[in-house]
Amino acid sequence: MSRTGTGGGTQPERPETPPTTGRLRAEAASDVAKEYGPPLWTDLWDAMSRTRRKIANGYTAAADPETLKTDMMVFFILCWNFRDWIMTDDTIPFGDDLKEVETTVLCMRRCRAVAKTAHQRRPAGVQSMVIHHNSRASIRFSEDPTDTVDVLELADECLQWWRTYLARHGLTAC
């Protein structure tokens, strides 16, 4: 501690800032576990598939409601963002036909509703998300509040729709 100016109070000394050389430290090869290049549509597809498996595992292992809710929201956000990804990927020569998919394909309309509700934290077509005692989850949509849709069934329907769409355009999704 040093004494400063008048008043006799003490303040801790600030450590001296070491001089910088104007460049970032290069990572040693041993520090890098895996390096990723620019993202591809397959990266998002893989993330969707992993999240779908997490939901299924949550059903099987009786996951706590918050974990199940989070996995569900992540899946549908990724699934809806996949549309935007395909539409804007310069390496994919199609995607314009996805502009109106939420009005022409029921599972995509529902996917969008869940994604928008989760992303914006306000209802965008979803009345409620219900976690059942048997560790299953369902969604009630505003379009028909009496109709509840099982989350895993909707996720599977969305993935199948995407598989069909990609195959129609010559791409294969695992």
Image (tube, rainbow, N blue to C red):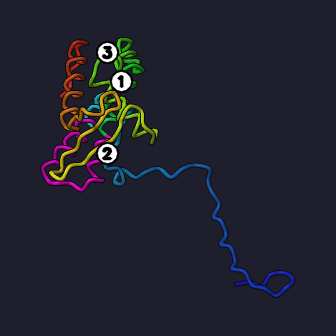
Residue at image position (22%, 36%) is: 49
Q: Main secondary structure of the magenta part?
A: helix
**Which of the two residues, 28 or 65, is positioned nearer the viewer here?**
65
Comparing labels 2 and 1, the label whose residue is closer to the camera:
1
User: To which residue does mark 2 refer?
Assistant: 34
Label 3's element? helix
Comparing labels 1 and 3, the label whose residue is closer to the camera:
3
Taking the image as shown, residue 131 lies to the left or right of residue 91, namely left
**Which of the two residues, 13 or 20, is positioned nearer the viewer here?**
13
Q: Amino acid at mark 1?
A: Arg
Q: Position of residue 35 (x, y in %)?
A: 35, 42
CA–CA distance between discs 3 and 2? 40 Å
User: To which residue does mark 1 refer?
Assistant: 83
Give residue 104's mark. Answer: 3
Q: Is residue 132 above or below residue 145?
A: below
Q: Position of residue 145 (x, y in %)?
A: 30, 33
Residue at image position (30%, 43%) is: 129
